[in-house]
Image (tube, grey):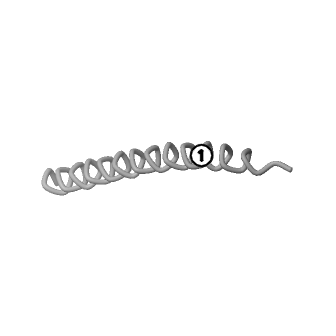
Amino acid sequence: MAEEINRSVHQIAVAVDSVADETQLGAQTSRSLNELGQRLGKLVGQFRI
């Protein structure tokens, strides 16, 4: 029984680490998209008629 609990706790810890990694990746992607959007806005602003 204790071994099963230990395995379950370990699986939860691994899942939490994975979610944390994915969250950081998502935040980095969001920042990159924001920067690209700002750059695109500046470029489009140069071509106003």
Q: How many marks?
A: 1
- Direction from residue 31 to residue 22 in the image, left or right: left
Residue that mark 1 sits on: 39
Measured from the top left, where is residue 20 in percent x and y? 36, 45
- Direction from residue 35 to residue 6 in the image, left or right: left
Measured from the top left, where is residue 49 in percent x and y? 86, 50
Measured from the top left, where is residue 24 in percent x and y? 39, 45
Q: Residue furthest left?
A: 3
| Camera-side residue of 47 and 3 | 47
* Residue shown at the point (39%, 52%) measured from the top left: 22
- Direction from residue 20 to residue 27 in the image, left or right: right
| Camera-side residue of 3 and 29 | 29
Measured from the top left, where is residue 47 in percent x and y? 76, 51
* Residue shown at the point (24%, 48%) measured from the top left: 9
Q: Residue furthest right?
A: 49
Give the quadrant of the N terminus.
Answer: bottom left
Label 1: which secondary element = helix
| Camera-side residue of 21 and 37 | 37
Three-letter amino acid code at the position of disc 1: Arg
Mark 1, other Cα within 10 Å: few <14 / some 14–19 / many ≥20: few
